[in-house]
């Protein structure tokens, strides 16, 4: 027999997966109450701020857990054993973020939902992954997501490529000859190396999806500079970006000028000097993320990214807080 907590969780999961924009705030409030009740770490953090249920009347009142907590604690709502543990990239000796995942099927469903609303079904695409350093990390959430997307389509051309070489070009050429829709996904430095070292086949069904990651490669490029250098070689190619991180289960994708969150995700901007102060659209500050899919960990996360929000719910990443560690999840920023 299911416990009352499990019944409550299942009901919230169903509401989250089927959410629409008009229900977001109401569901977020219910998720906050659930996590305040069943997540001791988050509840203690709220109490340190002297914030309890009596002070939460709208989502703007909700405290956001600092993302660094994922480095020092197992963030968990409820009592359960993880099916997987995602960890962040980091230099040797650096403490990594760890995100415990209760149900990988849930992660795959949420990732598919976010992708599908913009690009269609992941199974329709051949996936070619340029993720050299990520392939050394089996606990990467990005690799796990792309592996799942590859498995849903079963296209023989799909695969990961640890090196930028002629094998990548051959896979792209085979896909072009079959006129297949292709997502060429990769870290930014690998994308740049590919296009500046080879004549890359380009056709109207090819989409480049960069995931950030220029750190340690000399001067860090802005996203616009990266796009310009690729288009200097490839012409009018479709380019998008993915915004995600170890601590999130939902993603955002760049459409035209800025990022748009998936249905289960919302971004707001907080004041850099006052983390409880939420700023209006058009103002720069730190990015707070509401990821309702994080029901089993924490859905309210204060990141170290600097950004700006827009009236349509979109956002851009402008950089990072000073003195914070660089991480690999989309650290290319838009020219301000």
Image (cartoon, helix red, strand yellow):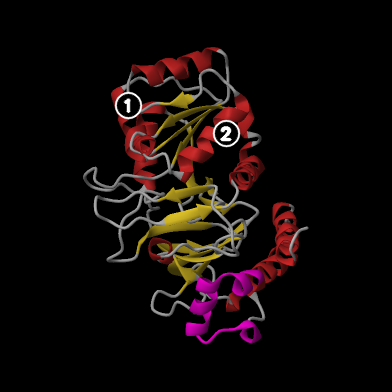
* Residue 6 figure quarter: bottom right
Q: Secondary structure at mark 1?
A: loop
| Residue furthest left in the image | 218
The spot of residue 101 in percent (x, y) is 54, 51
Question: Is 328 left, or right, of 204 in this rendering?
Answer: left
- The reply to whether the magenta stretch includes residue 127 is no
Q: Check the image and report above or below for 144 versus 293.
A: above
Left/right placement of residue 185 relative to residue 57 reads: left
Residue 299 occupies which quadrant of the picture?
bottom right
Are there few (<14), some (14-19), or many (20+) residues within 10 Å of tag 2? many
The image position of residue 125, as x and y in percent, is 58, 27
- On the image, numbered disc 2 is attached to which residue? 149
Q: Which mark is residue 273?
A: none
- Mark 2 secondary-structure assignment: helix
First in residue order: circle 1 vs circle 2: 2
Q: Cα distance, mark 1 to mark 2? A: 21 Å
Which residue has dot 1 on it? 163
Q: Is residue 164 above or below residue 50?
A: above
Q: Residue at x 38, y 61 (%)?
A: 71
Q: Is residue 118 above or below residue 101?
A: above
Asked if residue 40 lies in the magenta stretch, the reply is yes
Residue 158 pos. (x, y %): 51, 23
* 165 to 81, vertically: above or below: above
Nearest the viewer among 215 and 141 is 141
Residue pictured at 62% horizontal, 46% vertical: 114
Q: Mark 1 Cα within 10 Å, few/some/many (few <14, many 20+)?
A: some
Q: Which corner quadrant of the image does residue 181 belong to? A: top right
The span shown in magenta is 34-55
């Amino acid at each position: 027999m299911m416990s009352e907590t499990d019944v409550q969780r299942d009901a919230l999961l169903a509401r989250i997966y089927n959410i629409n924009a008009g229900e977001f705030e109401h569901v977020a409030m219910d998720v906050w109450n659930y996590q305040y009740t069943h997540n001791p770490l988050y509840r203690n953090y709220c109490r340190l701020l002297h914030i309890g249920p009596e002070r939460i009347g709208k989502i703007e009142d909700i405290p956001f857990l600092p993302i660094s907590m994922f480095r020092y604690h197992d963030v968990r709502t409820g009592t359960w054993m993880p099916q997987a543990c995602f960890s962040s990239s980091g230099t040797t000796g650096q403490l990594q973020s760890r995100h415990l995942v209760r149900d990988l099927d849930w992660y795959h469903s949420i990732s598919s939902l976010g992708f599908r609303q913009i690009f269609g079904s992941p199974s329709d695409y051949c996936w070619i992954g340029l993720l050299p350093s990520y392939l050394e990390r089996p606990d990467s959430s990005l690799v796990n997501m792309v592996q799942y997307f590859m498995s849903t389509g079963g296209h023989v051309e799909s695969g990961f490529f640890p090196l930028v070489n002629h094998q990548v070009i051959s896979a792209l050429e085979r896909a072009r000859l079959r006129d297949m829709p292709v997502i060429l996904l990769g870290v930014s430095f690998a994308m740049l190396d590919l296009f500046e070292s080879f004549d890359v086949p380009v056709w109207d069904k090819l989409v480049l999806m960069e995931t950030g990651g220029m750190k340690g490669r000399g001067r860090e490029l802005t996203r616009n500079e990266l796009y310009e250098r690729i288009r200097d070689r490839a012409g009018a190619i479709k380019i998008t970006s993915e915004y995600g991180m170890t601590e999130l289960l939902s993603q955002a994708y760049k459409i035209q000028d800025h990022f748009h969150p998936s249905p289960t995700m919302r971004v707001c901007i907080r004041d850099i000097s006052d983390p409880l102060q939420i700023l209006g659209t058009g103002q720069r500050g730190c990015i707070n993320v509401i990821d309702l899919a994080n029901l089993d960990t924490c859905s309210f996360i204060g990141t170290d990214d600097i950004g700006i929000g827009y009236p349509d719910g979109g956002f851009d990443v402008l950089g990072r807080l000073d003195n914070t560690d660089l991480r690999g999840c989309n650290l290319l920023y838009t020219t301000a």
